[in-house]
Image: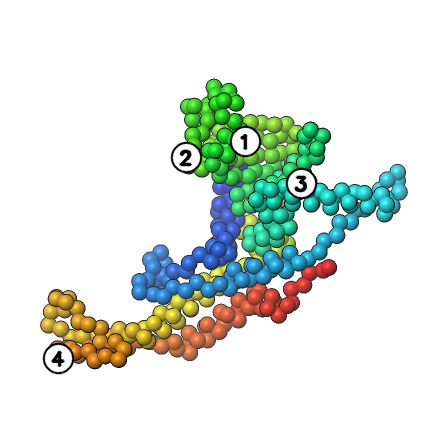
Amino acid sequence: MSTLDYVIAKENELKTTLYPRMDKDASLVHLDPYVLTRLDQPDKKIDNVVNVTLNAAGILANSIVAVLLKATTQTVVQGMKNNRPMTDKETSFIEAFLEANYEQIDDILIKQNRAVLRAWLANHLVARGWTGACYFPYLENGEYYPDLINWDMRYGSWEYGRKELNWTGYRTPRSPSSINFEYGTPETQDVSRGWVGEKGYLAHGEDLIDIVTYLDDEKQDIYIGGVHIKSMKHNWGRVPAIIQATPSGFMLRDKGYMSHEGESIFQFNRDLFGEQNRNASIEQTLGMKSILPPYTEELDNPGVGEPAPYPDKVATITEVPKGSTPKLLQQPDLNNAAIQGHTDINAAIGEGGLNSVDKGDVRMPS
């Protein structure tokens, strides 16, 4: 069994639990357009409807991220040296190094056109509930590089052992040009390997291809398009990666518990946003019908010939043949039950997150 098989097996497990929840949350963050569908056939959309996508989910996520980014952090080091607690002067050197290390990580991320570390962590903990990173610091030409690669855990896989991570994997799509730049082309590599295609390299213009990185406490394996192309040993003695979930959810261990592990900010509102959009769509559709109400008309041969002009144009008198006067088709108004449902849904969403932001109840320690 190859290391890629471990990754694929874990991904298949997460596809039935955690990944679907993350996909739904991503749809809420991106405010994917809502479409009103039939109750008896949820896969069929309803025509002639004003579909409304409200922004409550995106505002909630963005507001919490903004609060987290305002928090200040302080690096504190404690330890022992020669069987005694380290002094403030001794720990200050380590603290200064760590602060400089974080700054250098951010500098590298900015040069790569990526979000700085704190922004990435805040966004992913809020929207995904999980975050992770691969950390491989190294020396090159006498210079220190804190190489940190942020992972979107929707595309991660991992297994924990008794003490810590046993292994972790990460899948990411890459363009042929970026793969050739990093892993070589026929001019720089032995093409007889044939790791992708007959020519041993990727031609420009092909579709994106998945790269899978596998890490354990001894090595790193790289797979491109399902083909193993590189294995590198390391001497860290542990998996050089970290995976962290939010302490949200009720941490039960029922079958499929991972779907509720490390909850995002949408934990209590996830399904209510859809109901809110449904209410808004119905309200707007009924409002539109009050402007252009539907009519019925008695005709000898309905559907034959030119349709009669719409009889409700503003500031006009519409002429119709005798005996074919249109009759207004009565439409249900928003009854008390619908109005109460609208109120209850909005109140529930407020209790689940938005009100705490609006009222300033979300506080971070300084």
Instruction: Give amino acid for label 4.
Output: Gly
Instruction: Give amino acid for label 3.
Output: Glu
How far separated are the C-alphas under marks 3 and 4?
83 Å
Instruction: Give amino acid for label 1.
Output: Glu
Badge 3: how crowded within 10 Å, few (<14), some, or many (20+)?
A: few
The residue indicated by pointer 2 is 205
Q: Mark 3 or 4 closer to N-term?
A: 3
Q: Secondary structure at mark 3?
A: loop
**Residue, x 72% and y 60% (percent of image)?**
365
Q: Is residue 366 above or below residue 203?
A: below
**Residue, x 60% and y 66% (percent of image)?**
357
Task: List x then y, in percent, for residue 106.
Answer: 65, 45
Q: Are marks 2 and 1 in contact (CB under 8 Å)?
A: no
The residue indicated by pointer 3 is 164
Badge 1: how crowded within 10 Å, few (<14), some, or many (20+)?
A: few
How far separated are the C-alphas under marks 4 and 1?
79 Å
Q: Secondary structure at mark 4?
A: loop
Q: Are marks 3 and 1 in contact (CB under 8 Å)?
A: no
**Residue, x 50% and y 34% (percent of image)?**
178
**Residue mark closest to the camera, 2 vs 3:** 2
How far separated are the C-alphas under marks 2 and 1?
17 Å
The residue indicated by pointer 4 is 323
How far separated are the C-alphas under marks 3 and 1?
31 Å
> Which corner quadrant holds the C terminus?
bottom right
Q: Mark 3 or 1 closer to N-term?
A: 3
The residue indicated by pointer 1 is 182
Instruction: Give amino acid for label 2.
Output: Gly
